[in-house]
Structures are given as structure tokens and as C-alpha cells.
Image (tube, grey):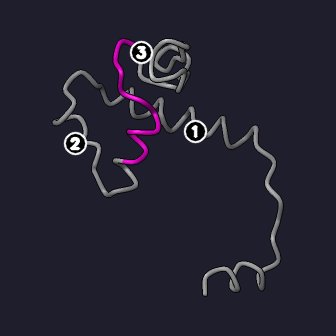
Amino acid sequence: MNWHDRIVTTPDTLFGKPRIVGTRIGVEFLLDLLASGWSEARILENYPQLKSEDLQAVFAFMRDCIRDMAFLARPESASADQRT
């Protein structure tokens, strides 16, 4: 999936945050919905201007963002300590 056709950033819309082309619906907002348990069907029902391909583009965009990030491995004990 080539997300470049569906996700844009412009300084004068949503403070330059990534959004779906032709909308003011941000990638972060859609990820929040998904993280809150919203299904693709529910999102598309509530935001009819979106298409399934837009949600696929969100995942492809995030995949590419994560690929570009450097992750530091943390020792398991540090992770366990932070959960308590």
C-alpha cells in the first residue's frame, strides 16, 4: 500500500499533523479510535467520507514510521519494574 496518495501534512491544517487527504481527520485520531476498540466498520459508518483504503494507509504510514525509528532494547527487569 502506498500511503503517500492518502495521507498528507500541510502546515495550515491540523497544525501540520498527518491526516487523510481531503479531510481534517488525523492519523492520530484514527489510531486513538482503533486503540479504543473501534472496528473498521464502526469507523467507516461514523465517518462516511473515509474508505477502507484510508485505514490501510494509516497502518502503512505507521509501519514506515516505525521502520525509521531506532528502538533501544531494555532489559526485562527494567520493564517489569516500571509496571509496578
Q: Which residue is mark 2?
A: 41
* Secondary element at image label 1: helix
* Secondary element at image label 3: loop
- Residue visible at 28% across and 49% down? 39
Q: Which residue is mark 3?
A: 21
Q: Which mark is residue 62?
A: 1
Please, what is the three-letter code of the amino acid marked with disc 2?
Ala
Please, what is the three-letter code of the amino acid marked with disc 1?
Met
Q: Which mark is residue 82?
A: none
Mark 3 or mark 2: name the one nearer the start of the chain.
Answer: 3
Q: Quadrant of the C terminus?
A: bottom right
Characterize the local packing of mark 3: few (<14), some (14-19) or many (20 or more) Cα atoms within 10 angstroms: some
- Residue visible at 67% across and 80% down? 82
**Image vertical order of residue 3 relative to residue 77, above or below:** above
Question: Image check: 33 left or right of 2?
Answer: left
Looking at the rendered image, the disc whose residue lies closer to the viewer, 3 or 2, is: 3
Q: Position of residue 46 (x, y in %)?
A: 17, 36
**Image vertical order of residue 42 relative to residue 15, above or below:** below
Please, what is the three-letter code of the amino acid marked with disc 3?
Val
Q: Nearer the viewer, residue 17 or 52?
A: 17
* Cα–Cα gap, marks 1 and 3: 16 Å
Looking at the rendered image, the disc whose residue lies closer to the viewer, 1 or 2, is: 1
User: Please, which residue is most extreme toward the left here?
Assistant: 45
Displayed quadrant of residue 56? top left
Mark 1 or mark 2: name the one nearer the start of the chain.
Answer: 2
- Residue visible at 76% across and 43% down? 69
Q: Is residue 24 magenta?
A: yes
Q: Position of residue 22 (x, y in %)?
A: 36, 12
* Secondary element at image label 2: helix
